[in-house]
Each structure stands twice: as C-alpha cells, then as structure tokens.
C-alpha cells in the first residue's frame, strides 16, 4: 500500500541534500504566538520541517489547546510547497483521539459496546470532521492494553483483552483512513503507544515495565498486528522501557518485530520528547547518542525534542550514522505523504458534513457503551414518577466529554440536569440548584419516589500523567450515598467515570448502577434514553472492576497456577489475601440488559480436529441457541471463550476469541454460531 511510490521517492531522495533529508525527520509544534510565525516560515523555507504537530503542549490531553486554524496551516504549507527548494509538503498531526468537534465515548467506553461496525462508522465521522479542519493525521487509536485502573491512560485504550484490542484497532484504523487515504474525508491513523506502555509499574505513568516475550507476543502485539493489517499509516513509539530497553531506542521492537514480523510499511513517530529521554533513561550519553540510537532502532520522525535536526548531520558527516539509514527513514515518511495525497493536494479547505448525523452516531455509540451493572427492578423509570436528581455531576458538562478532547465544546454538551429537563419538564422532577452544594438535598428527596445520583470522576483525574493510588469514589460522594441510602429511598447511581472505580461499599447501597463512562457529546441524552426505557442497555465492560485498589492487578485472562489460588473464577479465593476476597466486583465481559437471555446447550460440530486440518483451513463450528425471555427486545453480546488446557507455556484460564451482538426480540430464540480456526487457537 505504501511502497507503490518508492520509485518516485527514490529519485526525489537523490535530489535531497543531507540537511533536507534530516528536515523531513523533524516535527515541530505549530506557532503558539504570531511572533513565532516568521521564524517557523524560515525553517520551513529551508527544508527543516517535515511535520507540524497541532498542539500547544506535550500533554494536550488535559491542557487547554489552541483551536484549529486552517488558514494558517495552508499559509505555512504554501511556504513548504512554493518557496522551499524541493517543495515537499508537510504533514500535520493532531490528537484527534475519540472525537473532533463532535466528541464520541472514550475508547474504554467504546470497547464496552463490542460493536466494530458502529465504532468504524463513528471514526469515519471523526476523520471527516478533522479533515475538514485541515488535519492530515491523528495520533490515534491508542491500543495500550491495561489491567491497572490506577493508570490514568487506561481510559484511552481498549481495556484488558487482546482480541477486543485487535477489533478496536481494525475498526478505528479503517474508520480514520476510510477506503482511500487520498479521499478528502480520510486522515492517516497512528497505532500507539508501541509497545507495552499499559504495563507501567504500579499504574504510575511513564514508569518501567517488565514484559517477557511470551506476554509481548500473546498479549500486547495482537492489536498492533491488526492495525498494520488494516493498513495503519504510522506507529508511535512509547515512552516506556521493556525490561530495561526503552522502546524508542529498541531495534528489536521497532524493526525486527514491527517491520520484520508485522510487515509495517509506514513510518514511526516518537512520542513527545521520547528520543531525548533516552539519555534520562540511561542508555544514551548525549543528545547525539539519543539521535543515533533511535534512528538506527527504526524511529523515523522525531517529535519536538529536536535531537535529529540538531545532531544527525554531524553524526553522518563523522561517519557515526550512515546516510543510508537517514534515507530509509525519509523514504518511509515520504511514502505516507504520497499515500495521503499531500503532493497532489497540499492545501485543504473546510467542507460541509452532516453534524446532526455525527451527533446521532455519537449518541448511538454512547448508548451501546454504557454498562448497566445493577438493576433491582428499578429501571427503566416511569416518566410520571416523582424523581429527585442530586450529586456532583448533575450540572457537569466538561467531564462527560472525557480526557483528550481538544476541539469539543463544553457549552454544546448537555448536562444530565438539562437532558432530564428536556425529557421530564419540571413537573415531577426535583433537582438541587447546582452541582456544588449538596445541602439542599434535604428539600428535594422527601417527595421523590426515586433518587437519581449523578456521580463520577473528573476528566482531569484521567488521561496522561493522571495516575491514582486509590480507585475509590471520592469520600464526599460516598457520604452522600450513605445519607440518601439511610432514607430508604430507591436510588439509581449514574457514574460518569473514565476508569473502573472500586464499587464495593458503593454499589451495594444503590438499587441500580448505570456506568455511563465519559461518553462524549451525547452522554447525558444517552443516559436519559436508557433511564426512561427509550433504549435498552447492552454494553459489557471490557475491563475488570476490582473491589478495591489493593486487589490490582486483577484481570480475567489470568493463567492458572500450581495451587488453587485463582481468585478471579472463585476457585479458592480464601488463598489470596488474609484480609479480603479479591474476586472481581464486576468481571470482564459483564453487563445487564432490561430483558433477560437464556443460553441453550453449546454445540460443537466436531469435538476434535487434527492440527493439519486446522492448518489447512478447516474450522471448528460451534453454535448455541439464545432466547430472549424478558419483556424488551434487546441486543446481547455473545462472547466465545476458549481454554488451552495443555500447552508449551501456561495459558489463560479463559481467552475471548470471538463475539457476536445479535438483536433478539422479546420471546424470540435465535441460533448463534462461531467458527474457530488455526489463528484463533494458536499462540
Ligand atoms: C503525548 C502522548 C501521546 C500524544 C503526544 C502528542 O505525550 O503520550 O499520546 O499523542 O504526546 O500530543
């Protein structure tokens, strides 16, 4: 896909000076002040800038960002294309992680939808909106598997399962890149952070990781393999080391595995400053060393720390780095610039798109991402009943968008109070005056038949560099729950959270728990659709909910052990801690509906199969009848797990290998079938 331009690129590289080649490997931040524009134009004119990241800080996920400015981007591009010697266009990248102007659920929420088609459609919308603002390339999807909710960035990824990670990778890359990267509504995607960042020790961001090859290949690589198979244009190297080897300087990971085993043909980009950080990580003695180690490892584009532009020329002239190595990196970057049509169409213009449709899709994905974790016959609510709404998130808007939102508008995001007022009017609906003072709860709940509590965590407690040591809900929220629980009123807890929070001691005091996550622009409207029965919840969590922080890490795809200590499947939880039982509060793959489903006997067409037949493409056919035995039509996520009982290494007690999500009408029975092949059963 990317090598088709190699002959043009080879002849272009022959014309390039060493300076111009190194300039292609240099990414800078866009002008933050008008006073910088002239200097940036001079650098562009001299062929020193290959790419601009449209961000005003290195932690764009939580800092306010300057908004897009397509006129300025075209003005700077004009300098590159009309005033530089070889007229090579620049590629513009921005963190369009889970939305642009329309914001979609955080990826950890979307993973709970188990709906690839819908995710792909939503990421098509996102690409359209970003492309219309002149953005060529996004630093998404983030594919870091993680089973440590202390890590703030768990919200940006697909959860704890490699198969779900692979599905999300495929859906997002195809969504962003569309049918053809040259299409005006396509943008280049970036599989990140390659690789193993989600294993940061203690859930503390930027910390070290310890990942054995078996874990690397069986757990972390699958999502990236799928992204490459889906044609992802770029891959971003991660900050972390793996067992003492920083990935950004690791030939094994960036070349031998990514290019050798996964056949990746696009270009790699470092995370912000990750090249220069090799010195801090103690594997480089100088910035020049950083540049040499990273380039020779296979790191092509240097994000913002200027190691390449300031050190590579001397390294080449001194013979410490071969110019051929530089040429290889330049070639990969130019491949992507050709593939996304920048040479034919360097300038971009706004174009119209169906914003209403995008909001509709965002609401659909939010609906399918939300997870009903508990419902003791209290949901769906009757609109005629007397309802009290209280808690710190009644009027909250910004947090509902989630972390990594650069262009979504808080003031365009309805709060739960506003969404409920739209649905109920103000007749039987009592709400505290605003989200800051709970003390007026005494005046609103007495007349209510049911109390809805808007709870959660701030978007600022999630995302980059936002690790927490305690995943409990805040004390004030727990106290408010206790207070209202003591009244004996029916309570529905709506949780606007990014990470899975410790629900022990919280959920048991609520009659219903709806985990709404941070689900984007339409979060509050989707919550109302579910609360009042306009939609039937169907999400299932893609990450485990531990009872408490002390039980982390706790994940479903755990291997067995010599003695029956497995806590997850309750084999013998007593053997885990003296002071508590570390079974999951809610396990991976769990979620309720308003209806009920009855599963029949699982049937396998063949109870055994020869390895050679598997290799030859024969599959194991499996089927099961599922009946909707409740009062509502509903979608059911049917999960197929396998267990490899004897293998060359210890295997997980359960591994998700496929899922389906049929709509099953009330009273209907359908047959769901799966086909397991060599790839599903291999390791
Ligand atoms: C940040 C993040 C990365 C992001 C990049 C550009 O440090 O680690 O995910 O894409 O820098 O903002």
Image (tube, rainbow, N blue to C red):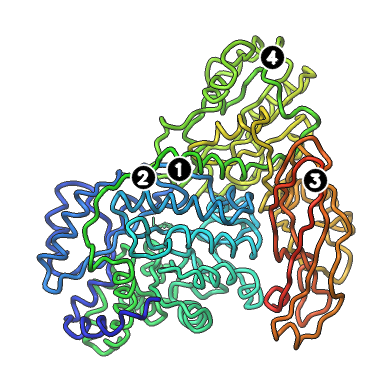
Q: Whole-percent x and y of residue 639?
A: 74, 58
Left or right relative to 127: residue 323: left
Q: Nearer the viewer, residue 118 or 627?
A: 627
The answer to the question of whether label 2 and label 3 lie on touching residues, with beta carbons closer than 8 A, is no
Q: What's the distance in space between the residues labelled 4 and 3, CA to CA?
A: 34 Å
Q: Tell me what residue is drawn at x 86 percent, y 62 percent.
A: 602
Residue that numbered label 1 is attached to: 358
Tag of residue 353: 2
- Given residues 424 and 322, the one toward you in this image is 424
Where is 269 relative to 596, above or below?
below
Residue identified by numbered label 4:
386
Find ligand 1 in the image and state its quadrant. Answer: bottom left
**Residue 281 place in picture, x, y as percent:** 45, 69
Q: Position of residue 340 (x, y in %)?
A: 32, 66
Camera-near label (2 vs 3) is: 3
Query: Which residue is tagged 3?
Result: 668
Q: Residues within 10 Å of mark 2 (few under 14, many from 20)?
A: few
Return the disc, 4 or 2, that comes first in the chain's sequence.
2
The answer to which quarter of the image holds residue 21 is: bottom left
């Amino acid at each position: 896909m990317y090598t088709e331009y190699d002959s043009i690129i080879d002849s272009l590289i022959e014309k390039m000076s060493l300076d111009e080649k190194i300039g292609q490997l240099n990414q800078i931040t866009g002008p933050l002040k008008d006073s910088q524009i002239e200097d940036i134009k001079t650098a562009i004119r001299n062929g020193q800038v290959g790419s601009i990241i449209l961000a005003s800080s290195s932690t764009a996920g939580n800092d306010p960002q300057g908004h897009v400015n397509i006129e300025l981007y075209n003005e700077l591009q004009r300098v590159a294309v009309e005033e530089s010697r070889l007229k090579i266009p620049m590629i513009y990248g921005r963190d369009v992680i889970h939305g642009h102007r329309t914001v979609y659920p955080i990826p950890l929420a979307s993973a709970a939808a188990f709906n690839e088609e819908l995710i792909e459609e939503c990421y098509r919308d996102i690409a359209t909106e970003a492309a219309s603002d002149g953005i060529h390339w996004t630093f998404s999807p983030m594919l870091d598997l993680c089973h440590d909710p202390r890590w703030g960035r768990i919200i940006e990824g697909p959860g704890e399962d490699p198969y779900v990670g692979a599905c999300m990778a495929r859906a997002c890359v195809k969504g962003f890149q569309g049918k053809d990267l040259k299409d005006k509504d396509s943008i280049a995607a970036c599989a990140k952070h390659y690789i193993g960042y989600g294993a940061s020790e203690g859930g503390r961001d930027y910390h070290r990781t310890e990942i054995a090859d078996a874990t690397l290949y069986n757990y972390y690589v699958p999502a990236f393999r799928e992204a490459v198979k889906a044609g992802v244009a770029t891959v971003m190297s991660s900050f972390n080391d793996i067992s003492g080897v920083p990935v950004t300087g690791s030939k094994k990971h960036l070349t031998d595995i990514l290019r050798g085993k996964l056949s990746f043909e696009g270009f790699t980009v470092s995370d912000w400053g990750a090249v220069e950080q090799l010195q801090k990580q103690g594997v480089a003695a100088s910035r020049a060393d950083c540049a040499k180690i990273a380039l020779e490892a296979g790191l092509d584009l240097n994000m913002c720390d200027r190691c390449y532009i300031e050190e590579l020329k001397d390294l080449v002239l001194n013979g410490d780095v071969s110019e051929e190595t530089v040429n290889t990196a330049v070639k990969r970057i130019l491949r992507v610039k050709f593939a996304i049509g920048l040479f034919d169409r360097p300038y971009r213009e706004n174009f119209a798109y169906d914003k209403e449709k995008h909001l509709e899709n965002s609401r659909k994905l939010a609906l399918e991402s939300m997870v009903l974790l508990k419902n003791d016959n209290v949901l769906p609510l009757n609109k005629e009943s007397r309802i009290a709404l209280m808690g710190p998130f009644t009027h909250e808007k910004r947090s509902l968008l989630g972390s990594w939102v650069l262009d979504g508008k808080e003031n365009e995001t309805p709060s739960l109070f506003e969404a409920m007022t739209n649905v109920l009017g103000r007749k039987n609906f009592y709400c505290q005056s605003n989200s800051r003072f709970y003390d007026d709860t005494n005046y609103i709940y007495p007349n209510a038949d049911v109390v809805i509590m808007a709870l959660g965590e701030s978007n600022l407690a999630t995302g980059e560099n936002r690790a927490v040591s305690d995943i409990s809900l805040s004390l004030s929220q727990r106290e408010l729950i206790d207070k209202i629980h003591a009244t004996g009123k029916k309570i529905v807890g709506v949780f606007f959270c990014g990470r899975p929070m410790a629900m022990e001691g919280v959920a048991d005091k609520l009659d219903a728990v709806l985990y709404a996550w941070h689900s984007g622009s339409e979060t509050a409207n989707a919550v109302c659709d579910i609360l009042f029965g306009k939609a039937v919840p169907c999400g299932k969590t893609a990450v485990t909910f531990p009872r408490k922080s002390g039980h982390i890490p706790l994940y479903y795809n755990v291997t067995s052990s010599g003695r029956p200590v497995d806590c997850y499947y309750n084999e013998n939880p007593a053997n885990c801690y003296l002071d508590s039982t570390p079974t999951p509060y809610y396990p991976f793959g769990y979620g309720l509906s308003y209806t009920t489903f009855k599963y029949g006997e699982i049937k396998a067409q063949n109870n055994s199969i020869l390895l050679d037949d598997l290799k030859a493409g024969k599959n194991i056919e499996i089927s099961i009848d599922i009946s909707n035995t409740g009062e509502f039509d509903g979608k059911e996520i049917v999960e197929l797990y396998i267990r490899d009982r004897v293998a060359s290494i210890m295997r997980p007690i359960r591994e998700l290998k496929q899922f389906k999500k049929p709509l099953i009408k009330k009273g209907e029975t359908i047959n769901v079938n799966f086909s397991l092949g060599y790839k599903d059963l291999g390791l």
